[in-house]
Amino acid sequence: MIEVKNLGKNFKKKIAVDDVSMYLDEGESVGLLGPNGAGKSTTISMISTLLPPTKGTVKYNGKNVLKEPEELRPILGVVPQEIALYEELSAYENMSFFGKVYGISGKKLEDKIQETLDLVGLKERQKDAVETYSGGMKRRINIAVALMHDPEILIMDEPTVGIDPQSRNYILEMVRKLNRERGLTVLYTSHYMEEVEKLCDRVYIMDHGQIIASGTKEELKSILSNEETIQIQVEETKSEFRDLLSSQEGVNQVLEDEAGYNLIVSKGEQLLGEIFDHAKQANIKIIGIHVKTPTLEDVFLHLTGRKLRD
Amino acid sequence: MLNVFMLQWKRLIKQPLLVLLFIGLTVLFVYFMGGAQINSTVKIPVYSETLTEAELTDWIERLNKDASIIFEPTDYETAKEDIRMNEIGFALELEEDTYRILAGRQDEQLPVIEQQLNQILTEQFRLEEVRKEFPTSEIEVKDFITLLESQLVETGSAQTQYQLQILVGMAFYFSVYTILFLQISLVEEKRMGTWNRLIFSPISKTKLYLGHLSYYYLVGLVQILLSFYILTNLLGIDLGTNYLPMAAITLAFLFAIVSLGILITALVPSPQSLQVVIPIITTSMAMLSGAFWPLEIVSNRFLLFIAELMPLKHGLQGLIDAILYEPSISELLQPIGILLLMGILFMGSGINLMERVSKT
Ligand SMILES: Nc1ncnc2c1ncn2[C@@H]1O[C@H](COP(=O)(O)OP(=O)(O)OP(=O)(O)O)[C@@H](O)[C@H]1O
Ligand SMILES: [Mg+2]
């Protein structure tokens, strides 16, 4: 349906997107994961015909969207990262306006507004100005506006950023329903690993303007099938302990955070005894130790040596 | 395009303060600057010790044929009291063949008034003498009346010109303010992301711009029309009936200003900076263009040259000329052409710049 090839974008000297290739099939739910500044929003802007790329192409059903945007635009819904609404107007007025822009009018418009308000659960507040809404409600209207014209493809740019868990679950549930029940094709951008794990069939992981890994969730996790993570919680961290861990045979990588250390080790290694020995030697008190099977978060950690969110 | 246009009006109706404020300021400024002059039609209380009441009324009636000064009957005691209380500057005592001026303080108007009075009264006394000698014949006074009248028309015209200057100057000045300030919303929409939402919708960019631009244009037009309507009624200013040329100049002027706004918002793409830049540009343009004072009093050649580059100058002068001298449209082709040319230049470079910035 959508095919992106070697897409790149430079802002003056700054390379925002370096080389991105991806595809979206009909009815799929695809995640685009990456930390702040990875180039997710820039990629989305190019796919949705907002920004002309510096290099590469975006094709919709084989046609270059930059040259023939009329094909893609009517069936594309985009939920921007920011709240892109006229906040002094009501939810109803916003939806009505954007509906009309897509050529919907009369009874059909009215029905569509009520149906969509129902979907996002904001029917009662529809006449109130958007500026009087809570953060979660604004996010939901931000999505509702993108659904007014029954798009076939929905691109969402971090639609749950900065809101409470309840609204977040509501939105996730809603998107899942749209995808499963209505067959809406979804490209979901986030830096919340859990969201993508819950929602998406396939995942692209992006960092520094490049796709660093892609595949189904299972495929990605199998990257780590030969490794597991040992989390060590300590009272305080010490570089001596870290050095000892790093030099330990069987430990592939040592990552430090405020709570302690994450060791990426080869599967099946029995290292607990050694770890306690090192702790004793470095005079470190271990509060907890925990062996984990890998998550997408760990995949990212493994690939970049960084956590998704700092 | 219509949707975008209507939406902007809807937003304006929710937050009309800015436009109402600028219309209000126009009315206030013009009323106090232009209106004060009108009420200065001199009123002179007149009393007499020797003439009967009927004779005095008769005299006053004859004197009042002259519109620039209004004579009102009073009596000596009241006149004296009013002068003492500083409520009036002076009063006229009229006798059968002579007059006196009763004045309290040195009034700056007094010498001028006295001169005019002298003229009027001397003439009237002479007429009276003639009348007494030939009580039955009609008397015609040709020369003198025409002379007097021409002088009055002259002062009246200076007065109108001043009022027009203020009216057109302020109405245009504040309409520039409104239009430019409204255009900040274009930058805000780009920031908010609603602009982007419209870009990836099926609506074309041309329609999107046209929807916005026609809205700014129309708000400006409505404001100017409202200001003119309120003020001409309030102050009794006559704009004449040279409607077509007046409209042509005003429409061309608005086009140039909307385009100027596009150029400014393209050059300064931040709402906060625009809040600062717009008043500076608007006010200095108004000063240079003669919105606050007539350009005739400016003698600096450099300033006059700069004025030529200001759309406001051409709009102002064009409209005032259209009202005062009632030219046909073809006689106003020069200012109209200059305004349209400026409009096209500003608009072209503005939109170009805007689009280039949004792509990088
Ligand atoms: N208009 C622009 N001008 C200059 N640099 C830009 C512009 N837009 C984005 N960038 C830069 O490009 C890089 C990628 O930005 P982008 O917004 O695509 O990241 P992102 O993955 O969406 O991040 P986030 O998770 O914070 O939204 C960043 O380093 C950013 O500073
Ligand atoms: Mg982003």
Image (tube, grey):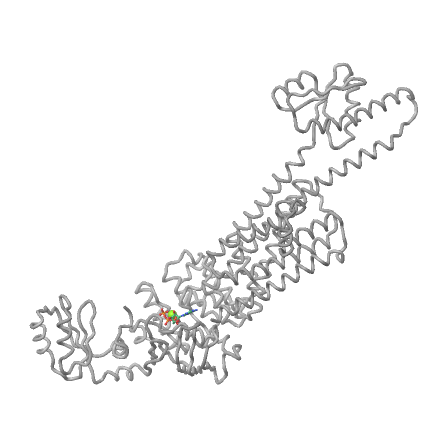
Q: Nearer the viewer, residue B130 or B229?
A: B130
Q: Nearer the viewer, residue A173 or A145?
A: A145
* Total marks placed: 0
Q: Quadrant of ligand 1?
A: bottom left
Residue at 56%, 68% (x, y): give it: B352
Residue at 8%, 74% (x, y): give it: A276
Q: Nearer the viewer, residue B154 or A155?
A: B154
Quadrant occupied by the N terminus of chain A: bottom left
Instruction: From the viewer's perspective, tell me whether residue A123 is left or right of residue B52.
Output: left
The x and y percentages for residue A135 are 37, 60
Residue B72 location, quadrant:
top right
Quadrant occupied by the C terminus of chain A: bottom left
Q: Is residue B324 above or below residue B352?
A: above
Instruction: From the viewer's perspective, tell me whether residue A262 is left or right of residue A198.
Output: left
The x and y percentages for residue B150 are 80, 37
Q: Is residue B239 above or below residue B181?
A: above
Q: Is residue A59 above or below residue B224?
A: below
- Residue found at the far top of this picture: B50
Q: Is residue A65 above or below residue B40?
A: below
Instruction: From the viewer's perspective, tell me whether residue B261 is left or right of residue A194.
Output: right
Residue B216 location, quadrant:
bottom right
The x and y percentages for residue A247 are 14, 79
- Residue found at the far front of this picture: B301
The x and y percentages for residue A178 are 39, 74
